[in-house]
Amino acid sequence: MSSTEQDLSYLRDIVRNHSAMVLDPSRDHLFETKLYHLMRSENLGTLGQLVQSLRMRSSPHMERSIAEAMTINETSFFRDLRPFCLMESELLPRLIANRRRERHLRFWSAACSSGQEAYSLAMLLLDKFPELTTWRVEIVGTDLSAEMVERANAGKYLRIEVNRGLPARYLLSYFDKGEDDWTIKPHVRRLCSFQQRNLCAAPWLFERYDGILLRNVLFYFSDETRRRLLTRVHQMLAPDGFLFLGASEQASLPELWKPVLSDRACYHVPVPQR
Ligand SMILES: C[S@@+](CC[C@H](N)C(=O)[O-])C[C@H]1O[C@@H](n2cnc3c(N)ncnc32)[C@H](O)[C@@H]1O
């Protein structure tokens, strides 16, 4: 049984319902490859059979697995570099000065994929701000995909992954070399924790962060979902905190977020609400 336009549209709806990602029909060919293992494990040979089995017997578990399998997990250490340079030169020194009394900093790598973003920030903090070793520093990474969260938790990366964006000095200082891979050292790992979390689904825990990286995920969502998410994120950021979006993403919510351009990188600060 081959897949019809109705089958593909049914699968797109499942992905949208479980992840808020709006998949463009031009990417329909990805269903076949990305759902291959899932179909194999269910003894289903085609997308048509998969859709038929879901139509006959709904399975929220299977639907969630489909949404997770369709995520695009592209990431790298120090991705886009400029936000990290700006954090080092300007944003973190200011934040550290503001938190001298509490000696506590919390960051959120939202949609963290396999953890490179969170670990990049952890290495930057350890390397450039040694005074923080006596502070409480937390970097929370969250992602929709259980597989990505598991990878982030393991902190183990292939050569091809550590060769992308990671300065050699950081690799030698902050990773243990295995036979075929590199594992993040325990003192870096300790700063980070990872959880499976859907950015677009209730319930939201109330958490407060000093810096939020919400990069390269907004463009998968509808305008309405983006607006709702950025409104919620506004409530979670400290008034003197910063938000980074991906290089090609904008908040476009002037009543909530003010974009600031500095040193060729753009970050957002929360507009105070009365
Ligand atoms: C392209 S990666 C970006 C990773 C990282 N932020 C970066 O910029 O390198 C997008 C990530 O968003 C995650 N994602 C997609 N929809 C999500 C949702 N509704 N909730 C949480 N994470 C989601 C995917 O699983 C994927 O790992």
Image (cartoon, rainbow, N blue to C red):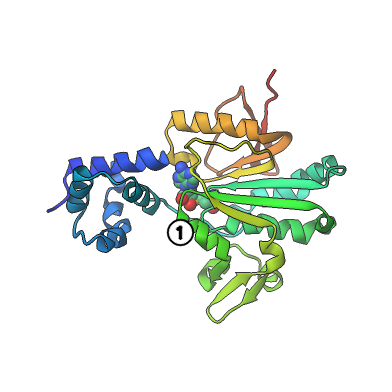
The residue depicted at 81 percent of the width and 45 percent of the height is 96
Is residue 244 something one can see in this rendering? yes
Q: Quadrant of the C terminus?
A: top right
Q: Secondary structure at mark 1?
A: helix
Can you say whether 164 is above or below 138 in the image? Answer: below
The residue depicted at 26 percent of the width and 44 percent of the height is 58
224 displayed left or right of 36: right
Q: Position of residue 244 (x, y in %)?
A: 62, 42
Badge 1 is on which residue?
147
Q: Nearer the viewer, residue 106 or 202?
A: 202
Residue furthest to the top in view is: 274
Is residue 163 something one can see in this rendering? no
Q: Check disc 1 and give the amino acid type.
A: Glu
Q: Nearer the viewer, residue 41 or 86?
A: 41
The residue depicted at 16 percent of the width and 45 percent of the height is 4
Residue furthest to the bottom in view is: 179
Can you say whether 9 is above or below 182 in the image? Answer: above
